[in-house]
Image (cartoon, rainbow, N blue to C red):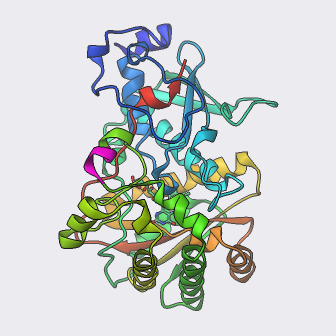
Amino acid sequence: VTRRQLLASGAATLAAAALPWPMQASSAAQPSATPLPTAALDDLLARVLALAARAPSSHNVQPWLVRLAGPGRLLVGIDPGRRLPEVDPAGRELALSVGCFLENLAQAATAEGLRAELEPAGAGEAAEALVAVRLAAGPADGSAADRLRGRRTLRSGHLPRPLPGADLRQLLALAGPDAAFYPLASGEGRRIAEATVEAMRQQTGRDAAQQELAGWIRFRDEDVRLHADGLTVASMEATGLAGFVMRHFFDASSVTGRTFREKGIEQCARQVTEGAGFLVLASSGPGVPALLEAGRRLGRVALALPGRGIAAHPMSQALEEAPWRDALGAELGLGGELQFVVRLGCVDRMPAPVSPRRPPAAFVRP
Ligand SMILES: Cc1cc2nc3c(=O)[nH]c(=O)nc-3n(C[C@H](O)[C@H](O)[C@H](O)COP(=O)(O)O)c2cc1C
């Protein structure tokens, strides 16, 4: 399918064989509508959406929903069936994740010689259709696909050295106005580390939050293939014997058990001592448009990191548990409302992404 055909035909019907993936079963979470038959997505749009879907999302729930709204037109929103009511009751992280998806979508379009023009879908639109996207012909960016394919969250192996000054300046420029970086050894860095561990301890002690997490962990390889979402043994970076034991012997009841909780807190306490520091990013306000925008800004930073040998690890515990979000917000004195705390660190080598993704056919609705 050429760019022109896409723009002219929109969701042209093509043979299912033209699609680069097999149709997969939908997740255990209840999607809000019936998945689109695979054959109804044309392959250019499907390629753009598959790259867009490499965006980060909390617990890897992939909460984006895309509707085909005519030739070269999409509506992007939040899938309410993928909410995390325990750790994200207001849907703040869902909107941030969809913001990351929108930034990925904009950059994925350029990988295919398209330009994505985004605008609010209009008053009265439901959460499922927040942003109207028009795909028009645009300049191709040859490096965009590699950038999107190389981005990942990396929680281990952050080196104990500062970020190069030039990189830091450029990353802060991408992060936009309400963002700051605090080295681990700074007073603010130590305060963020402390709040993160305390919030982790509190969250881990909440049975309902732990049960919710358990519902999004895919221990078995067949569950990873079946759901293509959530956290996996590989994405949690459990390797060697620990990884083997988790893959074969762990289940949801392990997550709510004492050992898993204690190890989680220990790991968090170690992680906050590793790397260079914390990037903190705020939104201009609490509304969904501001959250989508903050998600886009974080997405922009995230896509600029692998090429610089910098790893990113969002650590949201302090933003999810009261009273730390408000306390940190007041102490750091950034404008707006805190939305992301991301630990950054240099790495010698950026490993390839391992986190699974659902194919566009699972999140596109006719
Ligand atoms: C809003 C948001 C919050 C996140 N919070 C955390 C977090 O608290 N801890 C963590 O380890 N990862 C966090 N992540 C990273 C996701 O777990 C990660 O993006 C997802 O598992 C997909 O993996 P990938 O980024 O390697 O593709 C967060 C991501 C987003 C977008």
Residue farthest along the front direction in this orientation: 253
Q: Position of residue 234 (x, y in %)?
A: 28, 59
Q: Main SS of the magenta segment?
A: helix
Query: Where does residue 64 sit, x and y in percent of width and height?
Result: 55, 39
Looking at the rendered image, the quarter that the N terminus falls into is top left
Q: Residue at x 53, y 83 (%)?
A: 197
Q: Residue furthest right?
A: 124
Horizontal placement of 152 versus 300: left or right? left
Q: Which residues are magenta?
A: 220-224
Question: Going by the picture, which residue comes out furthest to the left?
Answer: 240
Q: Is residue 146 visible?
A: no
**Where in the figure is residue 186, as x and y percent of width and height?**
54, 90
Q: Quadrant of residue 345?
A: bottom left
Q: Is residue 107 above or below residue 351?
A: above
* Relative to 201, 326 lies left or right: right
Relative height, residue 252 to residue 81 (above, below):
below
Near-viewer residue (118 or 64): 64
Rendered location of residue 230, percent (x, y): 43, 51
- Name the residue: 36% across, 28% down: 47
Residue 173: image quadrant is: bottom right
Please indicate, yes or no, whether residue 99 appears anywhere in the rendered image.
yes
Query: Which residue is rendered at x = 31% and y = 51% of the image?
Result: 150
The mark tally for this picture is 0
Q: Which residue shows up at 30% across the image and 66% down it?
A: 237
Along the viewing direction, whichever of 309 and 37 lies nearer the viewer = 37
Q: Is residue 263 left or right of residue 294?
A: left
Q: Tell whether position 106 is magenta.
A: no
222 is within the stretch colored magenta: yes
Q: Quadrant of residue 50?
A: top left
Using the image as rendered, state which of residue 171 and residue 364 is in the foreground: 364
Q: Quadrant of the C terminus?
A: top right
